[in-house]
Image (cartoon, rainbow, N blue to C red):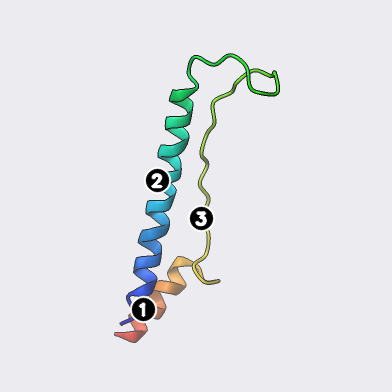
């Protein structure tokens, strides 16, 4: 069984959560800011996640491939 696919899925989840934490810390650091460098109002940043296929396959296809290898 090839373990690279489950590790890739886990790694992408960890990367997503790291991005979320970086955005939260940026928002906290700029909590007292009223203007951006361009002079506009500071707005908090938000992270929006969307699903993405792994190596061109949907998650169900990845699971089927892994099940067929057993």
Of helix, strand and loop, which one carries label 3? loop
In-front residue for pair 14/63 = 14
Q: Secondary structure at mark 2?
A: helix
48 on left or right of 35? left
First in sequence: mark 2 or mark 1?
Answer: 2
Cβ–Cβ under 8 Å for marks 2 and 3: no
Dot 3, how many residues are within 10 Å of its Cα: few (below 14), some (14-19), or many (20+)? Answer: few
User: Is residue 11 positioned above or below 40 on the image?
Assistant: below
**Of the pair 18 and 48, the residue shown nearer to us:** 18
Marks 2/1: CA–CA distance: 25 Å
Helix, strand or loop at label 1? It is helix
**Quadrant in which the C terminus appears:** bottom left
Could you tell me residue 63's position as x and y percent?
A: 38, 73
Q: Badge 1 local density, few (<14 within 10 Å), some, or many (20+)?
A: some
Do tag 2 and tag 1 residues touch (Cβ < 8 Å)? no
Query: In the figure, residue 18 lies in which quadrant?
Result: top left
Which-is-in-front pick, marks 2 and 1?
2
| Residue at 39 percent of width and 63 percent of height | 9
Position of 28 with respect to 34 (left or right) is: left
Q: Position of residue 17 (x, y in %)?
A: 39, 46
Question: Residue tagged by mark 2?
Answer: 17
> Is the Cβ of the residue at disc 3 closer than 8 Å to that at disc 1?
no
* Mark closer to the chain start, 3 or 1: 3
Q: Which residue is mark 3?
A: 51
Q: Where in the figure is residue 5, as x and y percent of width and height?
A: 39, 72
Name the residue that disc number 1 marks.
66
Indicate left or right for 35 with 22 as reference: right
In screen coordinates, is 65 left or right of 51? left
For residue 28, which numbered disc appears in the image?
Answer: none
Residue 61 is situated, as x and y percent measured from the top left of the image, at 46, 73
CA separation in Å, label 3 and label 1: 20 Å
Q: Is residue 7 above or below residue 34?
A: below
């Amino acid at each position: 069984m090839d373990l690279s696919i489950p590790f890739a899925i886990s790694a992408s989840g960890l990367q997503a959560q790291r991005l979320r934490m970086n955005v939260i810390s940026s928002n906290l650091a700029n909590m007292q800011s009223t203007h951006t460098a361009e002079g506009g109002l500071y707005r908090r940043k938000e992270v929006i996640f969307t699903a993405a296929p792994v190596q061109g396959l949907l998650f169900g296809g990845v699971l089927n491939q892994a099940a067929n290898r057993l």
